[in-house]
Image (spheres, rainbow, N blue to C red):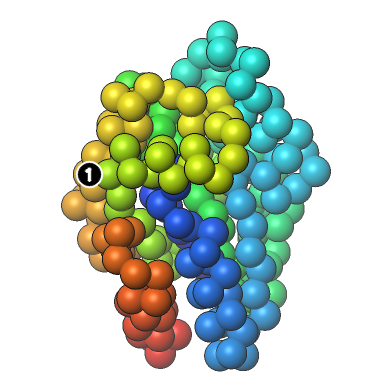
Amino acid sequence: MRGIFITMEGPDGAGKTTQINLLSEYLKEKGYEVLVTREPGGTVISEAIRALLLDPAHTEMKPETEMLLYASARAQLVHEVIGPAIESGKAVISDRFVDSSVVYQGIARGLGIDTVYAVNKPAIGDYQPDVTFLLDLPAETGIARKKEQAELDRMERETIEFHKKVAEGYRTLAERDPGRIFKVDATLPIEVICDMMKSRVSGLLRR
């Protein structure tokens, strides 16, 4: 039996990790073996690419380089981890997926949505999320949260104007694909957000 594929998206500081952990426990209670992964990362090769992408020292990195590196890390993760897990019947939850590249590089960097999709087509093959949860949060709130948690990486250190484009870009994607992308107000209490996600996943499991 083919498993299910869930992705968690949103601006930096939206609270994705917390909701992923809660959703993972819910799926385990439903009898699923759960695999949680992240982008960029999730494999030895992808984690090495992650270090390149997020190193604050790499201020000279071009948007095209950034896009291709994210796609490369994603290709390795999909073919080595995500694809086999789905085919073996597991529930896969990924912290970010193609939508992140579409928003960060396609919209905020200005490379174009269609360009990012085309570059990522060989990276993801036929593996599309069954549902994507978008934690919608104002850019200012998200960055303020991140500054309280840890030192900011290269992407998190971008200007507030960039992060505003990211937040708005996610809303644009949600409007384009409402059947897959489930937008949730990330300022709501954690338990309320979790219950909304469980309800959506419950419907997915019934189907």
Quadrant occupied by the N terminus = bottom right
Q: Is residue 77 above or below residue 132?
A: above
- Residue drawn at x 33%, y 59% as measured from the top left: 186
Res. 204 image quadrant: bottom left
**Going by the picture, which residue comes out furthest to the top?**
60
Which residue is under mark 1? 172
Q: Is residue 121 visible?
A: no
Q: Give the camera-side residue of 143 and 121.
A: 143
Q: Amino acid at mark 1?
A: Thr
Q: Is residue 98 above or below residue 131?
A: above
Image location of residue 138, percent across then percent down: 27, 44
Image location of residue 133, percent across then percent down: 38, 62
**Going by the picture, which residue comes out furthest to the right?**
44
- Residue drawn at x 56%, y 90% as measured from the top left: 30
**Going by the picture, which residue comes out furthest to the left?**
175
Quadrant occupied by the C terminus = bottom left
Res. 74 image quadrant: top right
Image location of residue 115, percent across then percent down: 38, 28
Q: Is residue 18 left or right of residue 139?
A: right
- Residue drawn at x 41%, y 38% as measured from the top left: 143
Q: Is residue 39 visible?
A: yes
